[in-house]
Amino acid sequence: MNISKDDILKVNVGFEGNLRSGSSLDFALAMQKNRKIGEYKKVAYLLRAILVDHPFSDGNKRTATFIVLKFAEDHKKQVNMDRLIHYLISIAKKNIIEIKNIEWRIKNAIE
């Protein structure tokens, strides 16, 4: 997925948020350059950084939703919105940090 920190910050500003701490987001963005991992895993790193580490003052779940929708659009895939929302909320509420678990949820929400 081709997304920059500036892109993510602009999206989040649209949701009335601002960056509080960017270290986990920086790590997730660095993982985007790793050619050894798949595209879904790259998105999983972004989602974990946003949903679990809460780098923004507001709009973390909405920003994560935007990233998944953009990913699906870029790959010409459909999203089951009910499933996606359920999974994103569960990742945030349960502080799910396992990348494989987050990756599975993304794959299961995108058809």
Image (cartoon, rainbow, N blue to C red):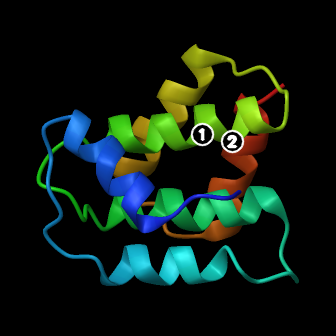
Residue 49 percent across, percent down from the top left? 42, 67
Residue 79, relative to residue 9: is it above or below?
A: above
Left/right placement of residue 9 relative to residue 43 reads left
Q: Report the front residue among 98 and 50.
A: 50
Measuring from the top left, give residue 4's x and y in whole percent.
51, 64
Q: Nearer the viewer, residue 95 or 34?
A: 34
Relative to 83, say whether 56 is above or below: below
Is 25 left, or right, of 60 in this rendering? right
Q: Please name the residue shown 50% across and 56% down the image.
A: 47
Q: In which quadrant will I find the N terminus?
A: bottom right
Q: Mark 2 points at which residue?
A: 71
- Looking at the rendered structure, the secondary structure element under dot 2 is helix
Q: Mark 1 points at which residue?
A: 68
Q: Height in image: 90 above or below 28? A: above
Residue 28, percent from left and from top: 52, 75
> Which of the image's four quarters has the C terminus?
top right
Tell me the tag on residue 50: none
Can the viewer see residue 104 in this picture? yes
Kind of residue sitting beneath label 1: Val
Give the CA distance from mark 2 to mark 1: 5 Å
Residue under the point 67% across and 59% down: 2
Q: In the rendered structure, which amino acid carries the disc numbered 2?
A: Phe
Q: Where residue 7 sits: x, y (%)?
A: 43, 54
Badge 2 vs badge 1, beta-carbon distance below 8 Å: yes
Task: Check disc 1: other Cα within 10 Å, few if <14, some if 14-19, many if 20+.
Answer: many
Q: Residue at x 30, y 68 (%)?
A: 53
Which one is in front, 91 or 65?
Answer: 65
- The secondary element bearing badge 1 is classed as helix
